[in-house]
Image: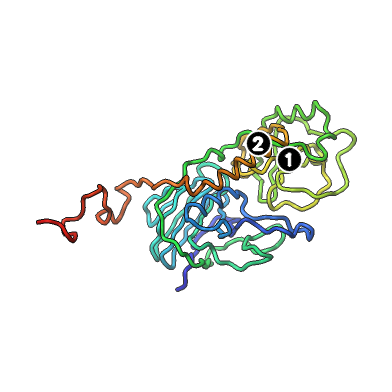
Amino acid sequence: MTRGLIVHRIAPGSSVQDMGRSGYRAFGVSRGGAADRLALAEGAALLGQSTDCAALELPGSGGVFEATAPLRIALTGAPMRASLDGAPLVWNASHAVPANARIEIGGATAGSYGYLHVGGGFDVPLRLGSRAAHLAAGIGAVVQAGEVLPVGEDTRSETGLCLPPDTRFDGGTLRMVESFQTGLFNEPTRAQFAETVFTRDARANRMGLRLESGVDGFAPEGGLNILSESILPGDIQVTGDGTPYLLLGESQTTGGYPRIGTVIPADLPRAVQTPAWGRLRFRFVSRDEALQAQTRMQEYLRNLTRSRQPLVRDPSQIRDLLGYQLISGVTAGDAPGTKE
């Protein structure tokens, strides 16, 4: 059988995602792609491959998968309980998977979106220059049990690497810049927005998330509707009842609700990974501070490969323990060159 991953069970809403598609907003197709683009870059670094490689996005929980051939995998994004033929797998790390072995991924212990990467990426069809399913636009579809996801050619072999854990999976403060309509909201309303602790509604999806609070609506002065114009991921629209919605990668391309601000790209991974009912706050920053944050993010991404560390494994979980050289200079007694 060709290289692939058999899907025996999978969480609803799971889909193959890459960095999304650019250049189609004028035709009504937003970028889409992985909800947490940082997790996609982390998986690429762990496997030593391009960030263009598609991964499997798992919202909330995973499933059961079987390798049809020896594969390399990496697990990133929202930490989930995972095992390989019953032996625990470390999250945010890369692993070797033998042919016919089963990977089982359970529910998230933090965050919202986990990612299963394979060496070579998932070789699903290209549509408009991307392998990403864009569910809102009807491009591609969710992955179903019984499918066999084809895996591309893998030219590398290293596994057993991990990245330092990140803290973006429990909510926190999101930095935002002013939008074209921020001035429609008076100063007391903007100040109240920045002082309010919001919770992420459980009904969030790849298009956006609703922000709940105990505060009456954040209405702008002079009415709630504006002429429809271009909108982007990170925009915070305020609907007719004064409820804020944070728009994500699969949002529509235009909208007529005023935006109180826009979350900076460097903080969108934290936004999408906030779990249901997780707490969020917002802080207005200057354009210069936003650009500095983006520069730091780009530097972090460039250094991801150098941040990899050898994975320290629990010997009790290593099935082929006798095949490992555990202490430098010590070998099995029958190794070539061993003295009697």
Q: Quadrant of residue 67?
A: bottom left
Q: Position of residue 79 (x, y in %)?
A: 50, 45
Element at label 2: strand
**Tag 2: amino acid:** Leu
Q: Position of residue 190 (x, y in %)?
A: 77, 30
Tally the marks. 2
Mark 1 crowd level (few <14, some 14–19, many ≥20, 10 Å Cα): many
Q: In the rendered view, tell whether residue 267 sits above or below residue 230.
A: above
The quarter in which the N terminus is drawn is: bottom left
Residue 291: image tag = none
Q: Quadrant of residue 297?
A: top right
Residue position for label 1: 262
Residue 174: image tag = 2
Which badge, 2 or 1, comes first in the chain's sequence? 2
The quarter in which the C terminus is drawn is: bottom left
Cα distance, mark 2 to mark 1?
10 Å
